[in-house]
Amino acid sequence: MNFDMFPVTAQALWTLLGATVWSALMTQWVKHYLPDWRWTNLLALGLTLLLILPVGILIIAEGTLGERVVQSILMSVFGTALATWGYEGIVNLLGKAGIGPRSDAALEAGIRGKTGGCC
């Protein structure tokens, strides 16, 4: 399968951009199913490792088994870090601009809702 802007191949997945896109997609999927948002990024890292590790070890990476494992883990960690920190940065900047769930109004309304309207 191949799309014009992003080729869907094992080789494309085992790049920093591929790992980042995969992790961003996994983050968006799992965040809707987790009751506690604090685990979302760790679960996205785990899912990224589950896919990138075998692809890197079995198909793409060169070198000894140990080198391939380390390369695949680093690719997963960096891809997940870019995806999650990128998302957090964008949402925080939008919140500072008064847009979205992290805007001052949204945060204040959330606090009021939890404390019964006082304060």
Image (spheres, rainbow, N blue to C red):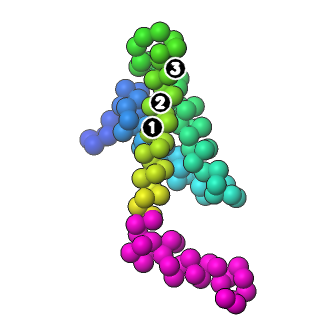
**Disc on the earlier residue, 3 or 2:** 3
Q: Residues within 10 Å of mark 3 (few under 14, many from 20)?
A: some
Residue 98 lies, in percent from the top left, at 42, 78
| Residue that label 1 marks | 78
Tell me, yes or no, if residue 119 can be seen here. Answer: yes
Residue at (73% x, 86% y) in the render: 116
Residue 91: give its label.
none
Residue 55 vertical placement versus 89 (above, below): above
Q: Is residue 102 covered in magenta?
A: yes
Residue 56 lies, in percent from the top left, at 46, 22
Residue 20 vertical placement versus 67 (above, below): below
Helix, strand or loop at disc 2? helix
Q: Residue furthest top?
A: 64
Residue at (45% x, 23% y) in the render: 71
Frontmost residue, 72 versus 52: 72
Q: Which residues fall within the magenta stretch?
A: 92-119
| Residue that label 3 marks | 69
Residue at (57% x, 31% y) in the render: 50
| Residue that label 2 marks | 74
Frontmost residue, 88 versus 33: 88
Q: Is residue 5 left or right of residue 26?
A: left
Residue at (51% x, 82% y) in the render: 105
**Disc on the earlier residue, 3 or 1:** 3
Residue 118 lies, in percent from the top left, at 70, 90
**Secondary structure that dominates the magenta span:** helix
Q: Are marks 2 and 1 in contact (CB under 8 Å)?
A: yes
Q: Is residue 117 left or right of residue 101?
A: right
Q: Residues within 10 Å of mark 2 (few under 14, many from 20)?
A: some
Helix, strand or loop at disc 3? helix
Residue 20 lies, in percent from the top left, at 42, 42
Q: Is residue 78 left or right of residue 46?
A: left
